[in-house]
Image (cartoon, rainbow, N blue to C red):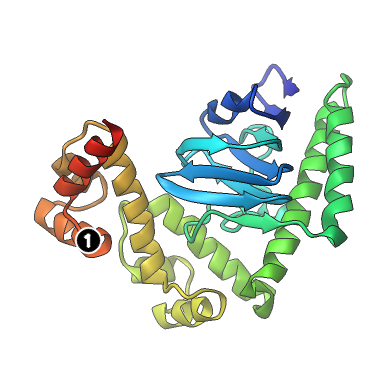
Amino acid sequence: MLFVNNTNECIGVHELDKENINLVFDVKETDMTFIWNTGEVMNLTIDRIPYQLKKHQIIFLTEFHKMDAIDLESARMVRFNQPFYCIVNHDNEVGSKGFLFFGASGVPIVSVNERNLRDFEISWEMFSSEIRKSDLLQQDMLQAILKRMLILSARILTHSTNFHKLEKNQSDIVREFNYLVERHFAEHHDVAYYASRLNKSPKTLSNLFSIVSNRSPLNIIHDRIMIHARRQIHYSNRSIKEIAYELGYEDVQTFSRFFKSREGMSPVHYREKSERATA
């Protein structure tokens, strides 16, 4: 089921099974996706990292995530583009930027328990009903339902992580850091740059992240660089030198040392290993 208007604002609401699973791979520019596993187990590989979702877990993805494989019994998927609803411009409404979407610190997975399940089921019933209609208020209604599901998800993720230990202004700083890293990891590798953008000291950022995560701000930056580096080495024909330059390393030897320190092998050996695995 798909809503599209003449200005390319688009949202799709799909019941997934093994017959139409290929819909998952049809990702377009600015698309954001969340997939709600309604079967017993869902296995996914994203950016060559395996994930397993239990029943009633929801995973949140942007266009920048590369879905390698998925195996599911049944699921529900919502996919919308930026013209339909911009997560960044409407962050004050749902608090999803740098949290559910554009979060450099990882792929968010929300676990819906029995207490919250009915709220999500009601939202899905509303989605399924509204997307079949056609009137002047349809888009407004679909946006309202989308916001409801995102807010419900953000609430659960807040309370299932240590985010609830932060004051709102502190959690906003962490989310904004994640978003900035997602946007600028290729140009800026140092915590000081992001701290200055947030008008905070590097020490303040480290203290905040020590509350919500076992990863430091620098580790988050490095992990994001590595995700892109692995993706480019595996999926593109670019030389290691070209990939290093794209990631802000003018010296390929510096990039190679960084990559090996994180992966345990050089970029060249990683590419050879990937090619053998593909073959």
Q: Secondary structure at mark 1?
A: loop
Residue at screen point 60% across, 58% down: 99
Quadrant of residue 258 within the rendered picture:
bottom left
- Pointer 1: residues within 10 angstroms few (<14), some, or many (20+)? few
Expressed as whole percent of the image width and height from the top left, the position of residue 277 reads 28, 38
Q: Judge from the rendering whether residue 225 lies leftward or rightward of residue 88; answer left or right.
A: left
Q: Is residue 198 left or right of residue 241?
A: right
Identify the image quadrant of the N terminus.
top right
For residue 196, say whether it is visible: no
Disc 1: which residue: 264
76 left or right of 259 in image: right
Q: Residue 62: which quarter of the image?
A: top right
> Viewer-proximal residue, 83 or 131?
131
Tell me: residue 29, above or below residue 201. above
Q: Is residue 231 left or right of residue 215?
A: left
Q: Amino acid at mark 1?
A: Gly
Q: What residue is rendered at 86% in x and 22% in y?
A: 132
| Residue 52 in the image, given as x and y percentages of width and height | 57, 51
Query: Could you say where residue 58 lies in the image, as x and y percent from the top left?
Result: 67, 49
Residue at position x 78%, y 55% in the image: 152
125 in relation to 201, above or below: above
Q: Which quarter of the rendered picture does the C terminus lie within?
A: top left
